[in-house]
Image: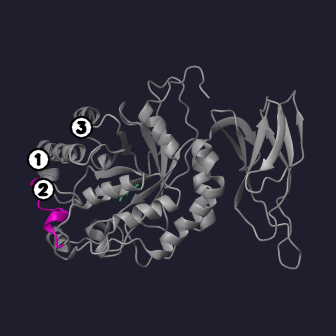
Amino acid sequence: MEKAGIPAPEPRVERFEKLGFGMFIHWGLYSQLGQGEWIQRIGNIPGPEYAKLKETFTASEFKPKEIARAAKRAGMNYITITTRHHDGFSLYDTRGLSEYDALHTPAKRDLIAEFVDACREEGLLPMFYHTTLDWYQESYVNDFTAYLDYLYRSVEILCTRYGPIGGFWFDGNWDKPEEDWKLDELYGMIRRLQPEAMIVNNTGLEHRGEVGHPEIDSVTYEQGRPKPMDRRGMSKYVTAEMCETINDHWGIGKADFMYKSVPALIESLCACRKVGANYLLNVGPTAEGQILPVQTAMLEMVGDWLRIFGQPIYEGKPSDIEGEGDNFALETSDGKLYLFIYHLKISGHANVTVNGGGAGEKTFTGLQRKVESVRWLDNGEELSFTQDGETGTLRFHATGFPYGVNYVVRVAEATTA
Ligand code: GLC
């Protein structure tokens, strides 16, 4: 709902917000070591030794169509892939700019070209993560002007050789905060060559939610919880995206058992949508390029949840109507109201379930429209309610999950006059 003093989103930003849920992919030479994408630095591996990983990079299991299908199955609408990460190695054909790319490995393929095609085939929007800092290029240390030219020409390739893309997700400016990165030029080129592309630049763990440059279309919340955006007085409408690892690593960590639970993923998705942010969930494919079955399986379960509750997740916008505790409301532009309810339990037989907790009266405030019905979105069960028109308070009776069911977060649809 449009409010006074808040700029309207540009079409690319509006389109991005509606996508809601995306896949982040961290994959590169480092995946062969299975210890995350920072291993060159953190493991003090000398540059020339690390660069040898190029000789064993085969991409033999990289099947972008399967990846795109898995993303689609999970209810994701876009994929952001590391076209080049901090180690400086590119998954795309740098067309002579550098030999440190996938074309100069045993893979001998432009992996980004294949990725883009696969996304389009599945109706997903391809987006490009691109590092700005670089551990490989000597010019990054010795001759920053020359380095910026290299970076500019790299991005120019991505802008001109892959058709219309969803956007750029830059990362690394925080490494040299004192330098002039000439962002007007870089972003200006993107606007010229890819007018529909989002421009994002990760502000990192320390500066979540900050807008760095006037061209930025979305702030980032790396491994965080997005806050409601206060857009009053902003010169343009900026949206938000939260990215999160599925365990504790972006690039594959072979010995990382710290997987999030499926409920935690569902709750992260809901926490993002509550404030109108997108959720970018990361997977780290193997050395050869395959997403681990455990990760695909987890994504599938989130997809199952979205098959039931997807509509409000994609179409719903943050609302002034407030729930208690974690509970919250979303509204759609055609006036539908969705109430997200947490912490319900199964109302089953006491011998088999931890009985009934969480069910009972739920209160939402700030609702001026007259409510006509409240029902669970999943099974249509009608819920009794009362409404105090004067204070704008809605109270309804949330039943627990029937035995056989636990959706983690359950959504009720309220129809209003
Ligand atoms: C950090 C890390 C990087 C990772 C990114 C994802 O900035 O440096 O490795 O790609 O976060 O958000």
Residue 264 at x, y = what percent?
A: 61, 62
In the image, the segment drawn in magenta is 95-106
Residue 97 magenta? yes
Q: Mark 1 points at which residue?
A: 143
Instruction: Decide which of 175, 115 is in the foreground and name it.
Output: 115
Mark 2 or mark 3, which has the lower sequence index?
A: 2
Assess whether mark 2 and mark 1 are in contact (beta carbons under 8 angstroms). yes
Q: Mark 3 points at which residue?
A: 186
* Callout 1 amino acid: Asp
Q: How far apart are marks 3 and 1 (CA)?
A: 18 Å
Q: Is the magenta stretch mostly helix, strand or loop?
A: loop
User: Callout 3: helix, strand or loop?
Assistant: helix
Assess whether mark 3 and mark 2 are in contact (beta carbons under 8 angstroms). no
Mark 1 or mark 2, which has the lower sequence index?
A: 2
Q: Residue furthest front?
A: 121
User: Callout 2: helix, strand or loop?
Assistant: loop
Can residue 259 be seen here? The reply is no
State the residue at coordinates (83%, 41%): 373
Query: What's the image's color scheme?
Result: one colour
* Callout 2 amino acid: Glu
Q: Mark 2 points at which residue?
A: 138
